[in-house]
Amino acid sequence: MSGNNKEWQEERERLVVIKGIIEQKQDRLKDQAGDLRQGIISFRKNFWDDVTVNIDEPDDIIETEASIRQQAEVLSERERNHGRMHARMKTLDRLQHSPYFGRIDFLEENDREADQIYIGIASLMDEKDEDFLIYDWRAPISSLYYDYYPGPVHYRTPEGSISGDMMLKRQFIIKHGVLEGLFDTGVTIGDQLLQELLGAHASTKMKNIVATIQKEQNQIIRNEKSKILIVQGVAGSGKTSAALQRVAYLLYTHRETLNNGNMVLFSPNPLFNSYVRSVLPELGEENIRQTTYNEYIEERLGDSFRFEDSFEQMENFLVNGDSADSQNRMANILIKSSLAFKKVIDKYTTVLAREGLIFKDITFRGRTLLEARVINDYFYGLSSSMSIRSRMEFVAEWLLAKLKEIERSEWQEQWVESEVQLLDKEDYLVAFKKLQKKNPWTDDSFDDFDREQEILGEMVVKRRFKPIKDDIKRLAFIDIKSTYCQLFKSGGEPFVKADTENWDQICKFTLEQLDRNDLTWEDVTPYLYFQTQLLGRNIYSNIRHVSIDEAQDYSPFQFAYLKVLFPNAKMTLLGDFNQAIYAHALNTASFFSSEMSITEPYEKITLTRSYRSTRPIVEFTKKLVKEGERIVPFNRDGDKPTLTQAEDAKSVHKKILDRVNNLQSKGLQTIAVICKTMAECIEAYDELRNRTAIQLMDRETHAFTKGTVIIPAYLAKGIEFDAVIIYDASRTKYSKESERKLFYTACTRAMHELHLFSLGEVSPFLEKIPHSSYNKLV
Ligand SMILES: Nc1ncnc2c1ncn2[C@@H]1O[C@H](COP(=O)(O)OP(=O)(O)OP(=O)(O)O)[C@@H](O)[C@H]1O
């Protein structure tokens, strides 16, 4: 702790003043919010008093509608205001707890006196709303705090660059409104605040890191110019943290033009979603949409197919990796994940613009109303200079018009008469009202009866035709599935033939799947891409920023598809090629490591410092992967990892149990027993559940809880635990090169302690690790 007594005294006094001002603002805001709330309640009560309701004439109805709309707008504006006050109140509460974490004294060029800039999670103005008492960490000037040591500095504003000298850089620890620590950077050695934060127990919720953002992370957070920003960061280097603070930064900096509805974060699994969900609200921002690629696919595919998700594919490979079927499957995965296959589909789509699209008959009650052949002729009769999509729209219009004609002739049909008998009272009432409106003066009740029957018939037909019309509007008259299948029939002849060795075999495999209405995980993206290229619908053009965490797990095709789905978005891709665990990345470079598949200009930032684990853990894990020597541990001390080997399962389980008990008694709050597969997790769970409090986490688990959990490595991605136990680090489980990254991912989840157990011979991945890096236990 630094700072002399006088400085401590001054900072304490200032803190008291600031807290006082925050309190005043809280009181004032509470009063205003109370008044507004009362106003809203009475407005709601008297809502109808100020509305003139008159529905006699069409003009009166329009006027009434306008009057209701106006009232509703006034109400929702007041409610929005109340919402804003509520959010500000929450921010003031947070500031009251810890108003700021940093201070810089900045002497601007040509000025005489340095300004004291205090930096916190939100800004605070003085009583007159003239001067900043606290600057938001995202304000342009606050970047100085993250980017420089004291000395000559400059920062960018929308109006240009501002230079000067930083005279002082100070960090504070303020908890519950009490100043607990004060450090002047440049005077003290090391980063105590960071030490303290990283040394704390892991939580079930990710923390924000605004007080200790590092310079290279700040580059990511404040990057504005790149359309595609790639962050390659080693395990625990703060990629996810940077991604979330970046979202908060962008929302703040572009608050006039950007809101949380314009941003999407892709994360690896639902568990991870719950883990990071609190970061943005903690920073006073609303959450953006967090999703997973699986979830997106499910949404778009609906129930048209049964499809395997990424976890099932993963599990299948880990369990049956060596079988002949898996070898064939791998061939399918490799081609379907590649940009080469995207090109095949693009080529095929170009051909389809001229010939080959397959249409469906439009049928009704077992009758064909419009033949596929006729639709086909109409489609290909339209000018080929129009895109497929535009022609489809024309076809849809034409079909709807045709259907209208058919609908009219249908009223006379026998089935209509029978269905009219089954209509209920309300329908008769509607028909009666319609009739009256059409001809209120008629005395001829016979004629009325016929006309009523006609109206009722019209109603029945309209109702029954509605789903057909809806299908036409959805362009469901194209048989996407059959058209996709056609690409694999006769090896794609005469349309497009993929230039790959096992193509015939891949075609056979794909057709078998599609025949059963199944889609493998690797086929899902090409299929949906094909559908999007034909129909051009459901593109998210309002999304302006997409962040993809664990980007190394996306295939080149998946990434290309995301670019089609979000045509107007800037992309931030965060990943680590050492943690690429999915099948498509095992034998080829993923788009992330090769980057060959990123055709547009991009900027790349590399993070090599690892913050999550203690130095001894990083020294151990870095030897597991290629080029691991580049990984730099943050200097935090701790115990060396341990390795316990035993020859029989009973004794391994006993030792694991002893370790779990020991960790629990030390007060560690999140302990993970990490297994290679779900099958292994179930085995471990059966062994341990009656002997200690332990929870099994599977892909249906949507929330991360404290305590001891059993989890497969692929679901533990992105998450961290106080202690990690590797359930079985033996040669039988981890020996193939394809399992190396999974093993590395599992080990790097540990913050403070890492313990490996092995049933029988230890994994060869440990061979290169010097024995001095871990303790061998018996
Ligand atoms: N600047 C920082 N200040 C404080 N803590 C940090 C900082 N950067 C990272 N951390 C901490 O390091 C840990 C790892 O961060 P994070 O999960 O963002 O890393 P990651 O690169 O996404 O990891 P992985 O790829 O292994 O999942 C977290 O506990 C995070 O709070």
Image (cartoon, rainbow, N blue to C red):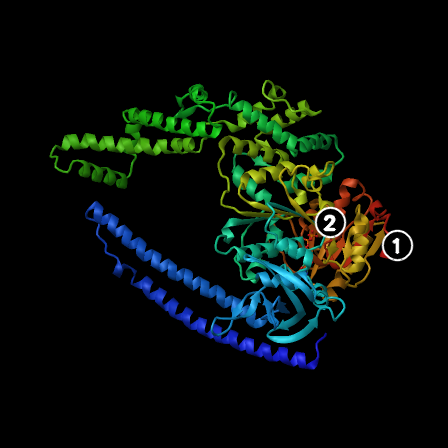
Q: Residue at 21% of width from left, 38% of height from top?
A: 432
Tell whether 379 sits left or right of 39: right
The image position of residue 448, as x and y in percent, is: 17, 33
Residue 397 in the image: x percent, y percent?
38, 29
- Residue 551 or 182: which is nearer the viewer? 182
SS of the residue under disc 1: helix
Q: Residues within 10 Å of mark 1 (few under 14, many from 20)?
A: few
Counting from the top left corner in percent of width and height, residue 37 is at 39, 67
Q: Pick the quarter of the image with the N terminus.
A: bottom right
Mark linked to residue 771 = 1
- Ligand 1 under 8 Å from disc 2 Cβ: yes
- The residue pinned by badge 2 equals 745
Depth order, front residue of 729/274: 274
Of label 1 and label 2, which has the lower sequence position?
2
Q: Is residue 393 above or below residue 221?
A: above
Q: Nearer the viewer, residue 199 or 448?
A: 199
Figure quarter occupied by ligand 1 = bottom right
Q: For the residues marked 1 and 2, what is the alpha-carbon distance in whole angstroms? A: 21 Å
Question: Amino acid under label 2?
Answer: Thr
The answer to whether residue 654 of the structure is visible from this angle is: no
Q: Residue 280, position in %: x, y?
A: 57, 58
The secondary structure type at the circle numbered 2 is helix
Q: Quadrant of residue 618?
A: bottom right
Q: Is residue 120 left or right of residue 657?
A: left
Cβ atoms under marks 1 and 2 closer than 8 Å: no
Instruction: Please tell me whether residue 618 is drawn above or below residue 539 in the rendered image.
Output: below
Q: Quadrant of the C terminus?
A: bottom right
> Given the image, on which type of amino acid does mark 1 rest?
His
Q: Residue at x 55, y 26 (%)?
A: 349
Q: Quadrant of residue 732?
A: top right
